[in-house]
Amino acid sequence: MGAFRSGRLVDSRPESLPTWRVTTAHRHIATGVGIILGGTTTETSAGDGRRMEILTTTRRVPIIVESPDDVASDKKQWGHNGIIHHCDGVHFLSPADRRGELCGCPKDPTDQRIQAKSGLGPHPSTTAFFRLADRHELGIFKFHSTSWSFAETIPETRKELAGLHRNALCALSIDTVEFSPTDGGIRMRYRKPDIRVLGPWKERINR
């Protein structure tokens, strides 16, 4: 398995990237990813062994999502001893004895963001599992994001995936968004991940 990442830490500070960064513990997976996505591969020491990192030259990757359940988003707030709030925005998802109870999060998305930024509420936790359409034999990859804008697209994405039943061809991308936040018209930009459903995947996947 490997992981897709849209950023990295530089001198302990987060940096968003214009193209995908992929990490894996397996050299053959790193080689396969490098062939189809380009870029440079480095090997580093991790806590549990060696890790391959591919800084690709690709921002849009065709992927195969096998089931709607492989793309999911909830909200989590972490404390010193683990998760202290886990919900879907309306009801608690854990712990088991509180599952289904109202979580108390604001209904308005803007208020949710304000509450989370102040440390009083959960942040989005979105995870996608998929195969590479061009090299599906490399196995399952994972992408995790805490992006608010990405999380807001997931309900519609899951609906589209459910309509295809199984093995959907999608595009996983890093998009650049530009906007003018001030009256002076100063252009600002930020990057966000996106999954777009393209249609059914018609080829057989040999596991």
Image (tube, grey):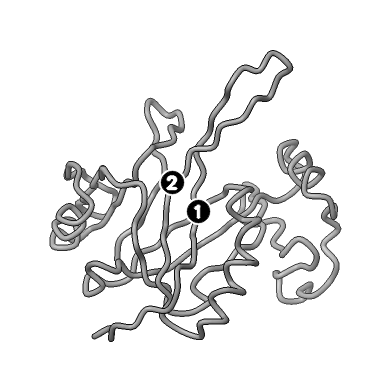
Residue at 21% in and 57% down? 33
Instruction: Give x and y (percent) for residue 58.
Output: 29, 47
Query: Please, what is the three-letter code of the amino acid marked with disc 2?
Result: Ile
Identify whether 174 is placed above or below 17.
Answer: below
Which corner quadrant of the image does residue 3 belong to? bottom left
Instruction: Give x and y (percent) for residue 190.
Output: 53, 33
Which quarter of the image is occupied by the N terminus? bottom left
Which residue is tagged 1?
A: 194
Query: Please, what is the three-letter code of the amino acid marked with disc 1?
Result: Asp
Q: Nearer the viewer, residue 61 or 146?
A: 61
Is 68 placed left or right of 120 in the picture?
A: left
The reply to whether discs 2 and 1 touch (Cβ–Cβ < 8 Å) is yes
Residue at 23% in and 52% down? 37
Q: Nearer the viewer, residue 166 or 142?
A: 166
The tag on residue 174 is: 2
CA distance for labels 2 and 1: 6 Å
Instruction: Give x and y (percent) for residue 160.
Output: 57, 73
